[in-house]
Amino acid sequence: MQRLSIQKFLNNKFLAFFLASIFLIIAVLLGISIGTVYVPIETIIQIIFAKLFGVGSIDPMYDSIIMNIRLPRVILAGLVGAALAIAGAAFQGLLRNPLADPYTLGVSSGASVGAVLTLFFHLSIPFVGMFTLPLLSILFSFVTIFFVLAFARKIERSMKVETIILTGIIFSSFLGAVISLMIALTGDELRQIIGWLLGSVSMRGWDYIKIILPFFIIGSAILIFNAKELNAMSFGEERAQHLGVNVQKRKLIILSAGSILTGAAVAVSGTIGFVGLVIPHLSRILWGPDHRYLLPLSILIGSGFLILADLLSRTIISPTELPIGVITALIGAPVFAIILLQRKRKERSG
């Protein structure tokens, strides 16, 4: 009886969105407040009201810290976390594999190759300048997914899930070797390249938010509009076809949307692992596999999680800053190990 009441409590979708939203709001306030200079939360709220409604006074020092340093960093971390989490949720549903995430198909490796090539050869696109790095990362992510899909189709015209996963692993391994080769040949840029690959949202500013935001909106909207198709395909391709889903078309759309999100996230922040793996899995355990709710919940929780991970990365050994990818791996790997152990126990007991 008690177990049923707990399950009913968790199945309340309004409660799920309420808790996820509260978690995100708390993460945002903590991310803005805590740092080398502590900003009281009431001051943050006061400045926000002053900016939005023109009421109240603004302390110039706090205003500069919030608007120029903390807020853009928090927003960027939130967008990256949300992009990776919703892409991970979509890939896990599409591939019917809890170990799937945005990196399974080699998309992040492709984006990373684009970034490392830019740093290695000091590439600069005319009229673009400093934004050459993120733009080439996004371009290489699209090239990678194109080759993965083309190669998978060459092997098997039906493009089964297993074929796509294996093709993604092959490309990811190859591109990882290319990155390692470039790092081995790099001189003075070695520290910069390795730092970028480990992931960071430090010193990015509002311009990087402008880069990721349109891709995030487009990719997320596509996936949310395909939530029902994802629900059908999570039970298998044959059953989805019987339900009237054009599996080939929907698979291509979902993979493309996930690649847009992953490519944009990697472009502005580098390689950050485990967000797209752990967050959707936890959300699915707590609130079920229905993608109509799972996708937006993954956005909220993934966003809050990466904001807190970034906060930890810049405060745990202050004034030195750890790469955010190190923090997500340290948190994500044990959590995912626990999830897998619990799942295995349930299978054995069941």
Image: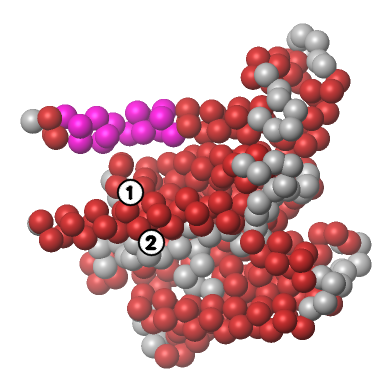
Give the quadrant of residue 89: bottom left
Front-most of residues 301 and 290: 301
Q: How is the image coloured?
A: secondary structure
Residue 147: % across, % down: 56, 82
Inspect the image, locate mark 1, and give the three-letter code of the amino acid beneath it: Arg
* Residue furthest out toward the top: 56
Quadrant in which the C terminus appears: bottom left
Residue 205 within the magenta-colored segment of the rendering: no
First reached walking from the N terminus: tag 1 or tag 2 = 2
Q: Point out which mark residue 92 bears.
A: 2
* Residue furthest out toward the front: 317
**Residue lying at 45% horizontally and 53% vertically, measured from the top left:** 332
Q: Which residue is under mark 1?
A: 284
| Horizontal side of residue 68 vs 286, given as left or right | right
Q: Secondary structure at mark 2?
A: helix
Give the quadrant of residue 8: top left
**Residue lying at 16% horizontally and 29% vertically, measured from the top left:** 5
What is the magenta range? 5-20
